[in-house]
Image: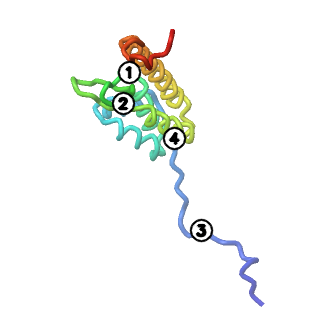
């Protein structure tokens, strides 16, 4: 009697193996091609690409930006941002940075995770400094009889 479990399966089509050659020139070319792309585009590449050249170029573009931190009186919170060509490239608040850092840990992108964690620390310091300035601006006497004794 015929038993199909004893048969060896044969693949009718050849299996293609693709090797990607990672060179500094390839990364540099991709870097130059994407240097004007948005933050969202680069993060999408990091999360969806299987090409090490594209991942490395996106990583470099995000890390090499001149990130700055600013406190917003309107939002009453600090945020990290990048200014390029006179426009704001992106604004990331602490909650945004926290989720980005978690995503980078999941993707094993430790350099970016550390970068986002460092920016969160800077946001905390900036927010603390802004709150201290506000506290000094309003003396305890302005609260009248409800002021705390110093």
Q: Closer to the N terminus: mark 1 or mark 4?
A: 1
* Left or right placement of residue 114 versus residue 92 in this view: right
Residue furthest out toward the front: 145
87 versus 143 height, above or below: below
Mark 4 Cα-neighbour bin, 10 Å: few <14, some 14–19, many ≥20? some
Distance from disc 2 to disc 1, alpha carbons, whole Å, reads: 25 Å
Mark 3 Cα-neighbour bin, 10 Å: few <14, some 14–19, many ≥20? few
* Label 3 residue SS: loop
Distance from disc 1 to disc 4, alpha carbons, whole Å, reads: 21 Å
* Label 1 residue SS: strand
68 versus 61 height, above or below: above
* Label 4 residue SS: helix
Distance from disc 4 to disc 3, alpha carbons, whole Å, reads: 38 Å
Q: Nearer the viewer, residue 110 or 98?
A: 98
The residue that disc 4 covers is 103
Q: Position of residue 92 (x, y in %)?
A: 38, 32
The residue that disc 3 covers is 11
Q: Quadrant of residue 40?
A: top left
Q: Closer to the N terminus: mark 4 or mark 3?
A: 3
The residue that disc 1 covers is 69
Residue 19: numbered disc: none
Q: Nearer the viewer, residue 47 or 100?
A: 100
């Amino acid at each position: 009697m015929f038993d199909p479990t004893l048969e060896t399966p044969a693949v009718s089509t050849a299996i293609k193996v693709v090797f990607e050659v990672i060179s500094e020139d390839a990364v540099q070319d991709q870097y130059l091609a994407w240097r004007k792309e948005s933050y969202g585009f680069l993060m999408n590449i990091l999360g969806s690409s299987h090409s090490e050249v594209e991942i490395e170029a996106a990583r470099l573009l995000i890390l090499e930006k001149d990130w700055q931190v600013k406190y917003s009186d309107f939002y009453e919170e600090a945020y990290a941002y990048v200014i390029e060509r006179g426009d704001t490239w992106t604004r990331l608040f602490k909650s945004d940075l926290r989720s980005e850092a978690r995503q980078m840990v999941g993707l094993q992108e430790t350099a970016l995770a550390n970068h986002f964690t460092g920016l969160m620390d800077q946001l905390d310091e900036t927010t603390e400094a802004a709150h201290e300035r506000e506290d000094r601006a309003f003396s305890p006497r302005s609260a009248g009889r409800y002021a705390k004794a110093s």
